[in-house]
């Protein structure tokens, strides 16, 4: 089935690589006009060129960039139907060893920027009486892995924000949902494993944690992002869909 996002205009943040790039590609394949809102011009431009999208250099933690991205989208396409808040980074520490600046960096990118981007697209969505926001949260939004502070605090917050904004704007036709992936095979995960003495062993450990015996693929997150952004999910709101092969349902084996 193609054309599930036909004529929709979507902004995908952090779409230069990983999950964001997979979402941008899937959205374009389903007929959406995609704005690649990415910090790194080289990767952002490349993805936009591949999919015939619009690259807008955007640091989602900078308010002027956030507003500029929404304005550039409006100027080019005249509407904003979908926002995917995907840009994020692992900020992992033992709490008592963490410099306070790391708390601020994590909250700015993994939580506050998602609100800033949403705030910037709300006027268009409210005027249209329709819109969908898809927040890329994480299993860290429900469960805790030691020594990864304060990333799970931000992702718990993002799921809370999804519910709060979903309720707030439901009557105006705007849906706000989230996706909580488990391990997904992207640069962010590879960089995490690279921090261990034996990265390959760490990867195998992550694979074994998931009942299917593997970790997720960016395209698998993208398929759910297509569903949530599309008209196939008109009554799905303020919800978080977990994509982890069943890992979070497992007590132990
Ligand atoms: N990979 C996983 O295992 C995993 C699991 C759960 C959740 N997530 C979440 O999925 C999202 C994407 O993760 P990924 O694995 O694709 O990461 P990634 O590091 O591969 O890609 C992140 C992208 O965001 C961009 N970015 C970073 N800071 C930015 C900023 N300030 N403004 C704009 N763009 C910025 C980067 O340049 C990069 O292109 C993140 O929110 C992450 O927390 C990832």
Image (cartoon, helix red, strand yellow):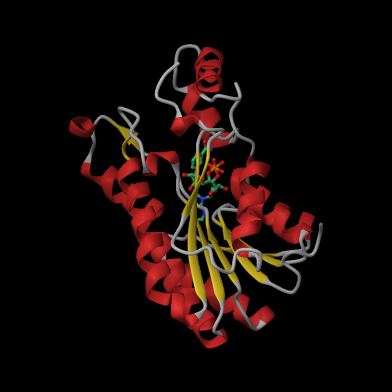
Which of the 4 image quadrants contains residue 38? Answer: bottom right
Residue positioned most to the right:
1
Q: Nearer the viewer, residue 190 or 210?
A: 210
Left-right relation of 253 to 74: left
Q: Quadrant of the C terminus?
A: top left
Residue positioned most to the left:
96
Count up the numbered dots: 0
Q: Residue at x 67, y 56 (%)?
A: 24
Q: Residue at x 51, y 29 (%)?
A: 191
Q: Where is residue 12 shown, x and y percent of the image?
A: 59, 60
Q: Where is residue 201 shown, x and y percent of the image?
A: 53, 12
Q: Residue at x 30, y 45 (%)?
A: 153
Which of the 4 image quadrants contains residue 169? Answer: bottom left
Q: Is residue 19 above or below residue 143?
A: below
Q: Nearer the viewer, residue 219 or 173?
A: 173
Q: Residue at x 45, y 49 (%)?
A: 137
Q: Is residue 155 visible?
A: yes
Q: Where is residue 242 shown, x and y percent of the image?
A: 50, 44
Q: Is residue 145 above or below residue 134?
A: above
Q: Is residue 31 above or below residue 96?
A: below
Q: Nearer the viewer, residue 55 or 30?
A: 30
């Amino acid at each position: 089935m193609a054309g599930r996002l036909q004529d929709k205009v979507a902004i995908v943040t952090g779409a230069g690589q990983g999950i964001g790039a997979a979402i941008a590609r899937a959205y374009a394949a389903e007929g959406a006009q995609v704005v690649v809102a990415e910090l790194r011009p080289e990767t952002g431009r490349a993805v936009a060129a591949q999919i015939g999208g619009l690259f807008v250099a955007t640091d989602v933690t900078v308010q002027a960039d956030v507003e500029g991205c929404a304005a550039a989208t409006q100027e080019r396409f005249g509407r904003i139907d979908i926002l995917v808040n995907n840009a994020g980074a692992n900020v992992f520490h033992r709490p008592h060893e963490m410099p306070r600046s790391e708390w601020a960096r994590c909250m700015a990118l993994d939580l506050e920027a998602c609100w800033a981007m949403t705030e910037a697209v709300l006027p268009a969505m409210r005027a249209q009486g329709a819109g969908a926001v898809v927040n890329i949260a994480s299993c860290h939004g429900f469960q805790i892995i030691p020594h990864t502070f304060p990333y799970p605090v931000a992702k718990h917050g993002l799921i809370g924000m999804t519910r709060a904004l979903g309720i707030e704007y439901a009557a105006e036709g705007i849906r706000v949902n989230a996706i909580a992936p488990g391990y997904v095979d992207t640069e962010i995960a590879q960089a995490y494993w690279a921090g261990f003495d034996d990265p390959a062993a760490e990867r195998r450990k992550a694979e074994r944690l998931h009942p299917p015996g593997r970790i997720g693929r960016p395209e698998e997150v993208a398929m759910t992002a297509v569903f949530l952004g599309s008209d196939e999910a008109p009554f799905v709101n303020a919800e978080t869909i977990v994509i982890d092969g069943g890992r979070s349902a497992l007590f132990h084996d």
